[in-house]
Amino acid sequence: MNSKITFLFLFFVSIYFLTGQGSIQSSDGKIMYLLTQSMVENQSLSFSESVTVAETQGPQYSKYGLGMSVLAVPFYVLGKVLSALLGIEESMATQFTVSMINGILTAFSCVMIYRFALDRLSFRSSTGLFLTAGFGLSTIAWYYSEDFMSEPATTLFLLTAVYFASNPNRERKKHSLLLAGVFLACAVSCRLATLLAAPGFVFYHWMMWKNEQKAADFWADIFRAAIPVALVLIIIMAYNYVRFEDLFESGYEKGGFGGRFLVGFYGILFSPGKSLFLYNPLTIFGCLAFTRFLAGNKKIALFFGWLIISHLLMFSFWHSWPGGMGWGPRLMLVVMPYLILPVGFLWEAFAKEVKIPLIAALVLGIAVQIPSITVNISRYYYEMSQQFGSGGHDKLLFSLKQSPLIGQFKQVAVVYENLNDDFQIVQMVSLAKKKEKFIGADIKVVLDNGLAVNVPNFWWYYMYLFGYSFYLWLLPPILLAGIAVFSGYKLAQGARSETT
């Protein structure tokens, strides 16, 4: 079991590292990175560098969860060390190490999917491997392993909290509940909205113990698990006060939940540009499997149901339900495990012939993710904005013809065709080395001169373009590919031996 877990982690982390962009390209990620940088370099919670046009002069504060920036501190320090040892420019090295955090966290999420499948749902090991591949390679989790955003960390911490909360071992129950509280607190520190999951934990614990213990014991368990969450909330309020002199001011604009619910609900589930099901085909079968899930494990199924529905309803009300310039329904990544794990009930219940659609959905999901990790998706957003102006955003969301699911494949072809223009690439590399920024620049200028949107979006390719030694840009991807192949082979070997 331990060796399989090790190979599982190595397989996914090597793939995520191999396909990682090695830089921070989202505005959310840049803001959280700048806070980490300021904490390390200046011991401050503010920074002066602007990331978007809307920012004003003077001290800037991150409006995102403090947890991610704190988590990044040791990785930032590691980047400084690598810079000194390898002679890599410090900003490039620190962004590289920080950007790789989510690759590690998503690999751990894959491990937790596998453990949950076996330990809580009693699936076979081969089923657990299928579900893990479904989550790790066939959903938007692969894309969000690339950049420095809060969703992968929130996903891992919440999943781990659910894993410990659902521990059936009565003797370990109190210890597991405390651990569940700790990991839920970690999730809340990264994204405050995760607090919405708390009633699900209380309800699940009540279902497990309603006939077996006194009410006083029940509430004592809940109180014990709530202590870490309460401590994090106190830290968040103190952080709010330092930033805005208001315990309850987070920096998000007022009226964030003033969106049109039906538009958000339809958009998250069915829109061509953000549909949960189109970007993650296996989730369709996860929904179909819920009746078997309820019959086989009603309590955990209801727990999962609360996590899925509560987040869906909340984000449908959110004014920015599309999740910005992202791939698929970014905000719903946190509930992806609870839509993938139920698929195991279908996988184990039916004959091999019925598994063909599941395998097809898995392969289709992988195909959907590949163009998003190959070429920076913001390129297509820029092109749509250039072509349709302010109307480009709605076309991306609601027009099948302009859906990123189609447009991103075209961008891959355009980028690889443009690689033949050596002069333009040299110019773009020169601008990148000078740290040229395009904040507020004309979209055509960005499309013509932005290195990140005009070449394959892999860190090792950037290092090749920047002229680093082949020891730094060629050998690491070869090693990572070798680890992925070897660990994948060992996992497949184990799965075959189980079925024979």
Image (cartoon, rainbow, N blue to C red):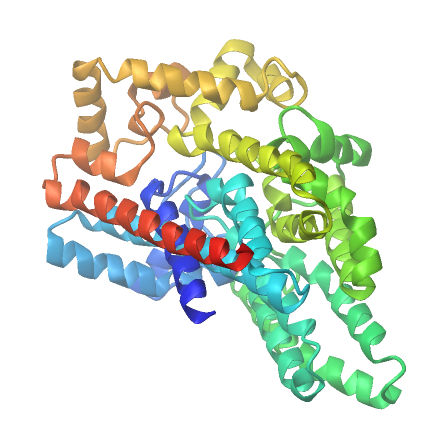
Task: Please count the marks in the image.
Answer: 0
- Residue at point 67%, 52% (across, down): 344
Q: Is residue 148 above or below residue 46?
A: above
- Residue at point 72%, 47% (across, down): 346
Q: Is residue 327 above or below residue 222?
A: above
**Of 399 and 291, which appears nearest the observer?**
291
Residue sitting at the far right = 211
Describe residue 70's horizontal placement relative to residue 471 as left or right.
right
- Residue at point 51%, 18% (across, down): 407
Query: Residue 354, how many percent across, how many down?
Result: 69, 38
Query: Residue 224, how many percent across, how many down?
Result: 69, 84
Query: Residue 366, how many percent across, how many down?
Result: 51, 35
Asked if residue 152 shows in the view, the reply is: yes
Describe residue 387's horizontal placement relative to residue 254 as left or right.
left
**Of 268 and 51, which appears nearest the observer?**
268
**Of 132 and 198, which appears nearest the observer?**
132
Corner quadrant of residue 44:
bottom left
Query: Residue 157, how many percent across, how many down?
Result: 56, 63
Asked if residue 47 shows in the view, the reply is: no
Corner quadrant of residue 313:
top right
Corner quadrant of residue 122:
bottom right
Residue sitting at the far top = 387
Q: Is residue 206 above or below residue 365?
A: below
Residue sitting at the far front = 500
